[in-house]
Image (spheres, rainbow, N blue to C red):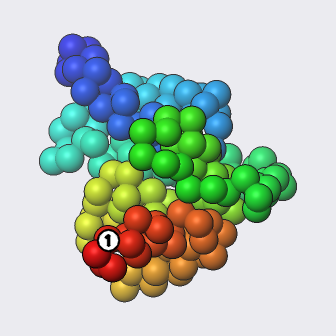
Amino acid sequence: METDFQAFVAARSTALFRGAFVLTGNREAAEDLVQETLERACRKWRTIAGKDAPDLYVRRIMVNLANDRWRRFRRLVTTSDPESGDKAAPGDEFGQVDNRDQLVRALQQLPMRMRTVVVLRYFHDLSDIEIAADLGISPSTVRSQLARGIEKLRDQIPVLSAPSPRQHTEGIR
């Protein structure tokens, strides 16, 4: 039983961390969230391992913990400087880090459920039905939250959602 849990941790900890980072927006908080998630999962591993999809169960633990933290530690999130929102050039690793940071900060400004839906769709590649089952909501609510979340993200990060100048010039040739 212990080796099953260790194998699960080895296989899924990176994906759990990515999801936790997007949910929290902070490396240290993400590490804490993953650790607390895995601690709870370890305590209930016999039950979880008997499920058809232990990954879904563990992800649900993480989302619930993130929601609890969000409610407890609600704080103001600083907005990014609009002048620093330039789109990264291809191969510009520093610019890509800036864009990623800007995206994480924009995600932090979404309401928790909306953020969770966006994260589960785009960072965990789940379907509407899977997200609905994870969160205990209807698939139509998932689609609605996703559409609103993407629209809010586009409003907050217009430079990242706008077509690149290269796309405009390619059609002219």
Could you classify mark 1 by the number of other residues whose Cα lies within 10 Å: few (under 14), some (14-19), or many (20 or more)? Answer: few
Tell me residue 43's x, y (percent).
41, 26
Q: State which quarter of the image contains the C terminus.
A: bottom left
Query: What kind of element bears circle 1?
Result: helix
Q: Does residue 115 sit above or below 63 in this rendering?
A: below
Tell me residue 82's x, y (percent).
76, 62
User: Which residue appears at 41% of the width and 65% of the height?
Assistant: 166
Q: Does residue 93 sit above or below 147 in this rendering?
A: above
Q: Is residue 36 visible?
A: no
Q: Does residue 109 sit above or below 145 in this rendering?
A: above
User: Which residue appears at 18% of the width and 39% of the height?
Assistant: 50
Q: Does residue 33 sit above or below 140 in this rendering?
A: above
Tell me residue 80's x, y (percent).
76, 55
Q: Amino acid at mark 1?
A: Glu
Q: State which quarter of the image contains the N terminus.
A: top left
Q: Along the horizontal axis of the image, is 32 left or right of 140?
A: right
User: Which residue appears at 56% of the width and 56% of the height?
Assistant: 87
User: Which residue appears at 22% of the width and 34% of the height?
Assistant: 49
Compare residues 109 and 136 and report the one nearer the observer: 109
Compare residues 48 and 145 and report the one nearer the observer: 145
* Residue located beneath label 1 in the image: 170
